[in-house]
Image: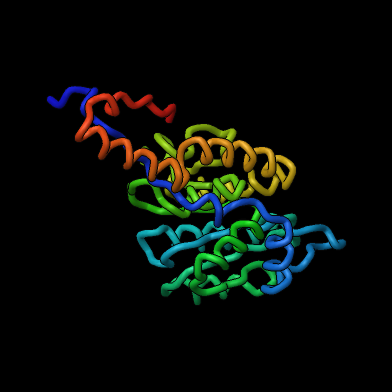
Amino acid sequence: MIPEERVHIILNGVDENVFKPDVSKRESFREKFGVRSGKNKKPPLVLGIAGRLVRDKGHPLMFAALKRVFEENKEARENVVVLVAGDGPWGNRYRDLGSNNVIVLGPLDQEKLAGFYNAIDVFVNPTLRAQGLDHTLLEAMVSSKPVLATRLASITGSVLVGPHLGYTFSPNVESLTKAISRVVSDGTEELQRKGKEARERSLRLFTATKMADSYERFFLCISDQSFCTIQASNI
């Protein structure tokens, strides 16, 4: 067994200088892609999805849950918009939910992704399989957005560690439908509060700067034992 003091954990990080809160990007992105106000000119609540739009990323599940929410929840039908960024066969399926509620953006470069995260109120990752530290979750959180993600150990054990950062659901339509409805019920003020906490946590743990510093210290440790005492991160 490898001694604990010889194990170095280096967390993934995203560029905190690119992904950050920016009100002007929020407004310009919404205007450019036609995110309209809800009923009675109420600001819409915007959900965001980004990544490969394929089956194992949970898009059949997401499609079915959104369809049910829009059919059964009047408030969601009138005031919720879903932005879908990415490439894959499920992009066309999302269009079937109607242009009033869903806008399919296609693949976005990093600059446009920064605008995308600012434009949304909550980021949804419906993946069906365990994975490492998903960059889309980190990008959303450092952009000050709460996340709605599948209840998998790889996510709840490191990224979404509590309800103060967002929402989780079991990988089935009923659970995801309830979670989306909860997001709608909580509203933008609560989402902003959770998003602020998500950003604070991300800046402590999941930035490119933190990751680079960890790698530097690791390589220094190889040649000089005095660099090997690394303070454990509070994941």
Taking the view exactly as shown, the residue that stands out farthest to the left is 1
Location of the N terminus by quadrant is top left
Residue at the spot 50% in from the left edge and 62% down from the top edge: 50
Picture coordinates of residue 46, whole percent (x, y): 66, 58
Taking the view exactly as shown, the residue that stands out farthest to the right is 40
| Lateral position of residue 64 relative to residue 20, left or right | left
Q: Is residue 12 above or below residue 115?
A: above
Colour basis? rainbow
Q: Is residue 223 above or below residue 96?
A: above
Residue at the spot 63% in from the left edge and 43% down from the top edge: 195
Picture coordinates of residue 153, whole percent (x, y): 36, 38
Res 198 → quadrant? top right
Could you tell me if residue 143 is visible in this image?
A: yes
| Lateral position of residue 112 relative to residue 76, left or right | left
Residue at the spot 60% in from the left edge and 65% down from the top edge: 83
Picture coordinates of residue 53, whole percent (x, y): 43, 67
Res 233 → quadrant? top left
User: Which residue is more in the foreground, 221 or 133?
Assistant: 221
User: Which residue is more in the foreground, 213 or 122?
Assistant: 213
Q: Is residue 196 above or below residue 97?
A: above
User: Which residue is more in the foreground, 48 or 222?
Assistant: 222
Res 45 → quadrant? bottom right
Residue at the spot 37% in from the left edge and 41% down from the top edge: 11
User: Which residue is more in the foreground, 228 or 20?
Assistant: 228
Picture coordinates of residue 100, whole percent (x, y): 69, 71
Location of the C terminus by quadrant is top left
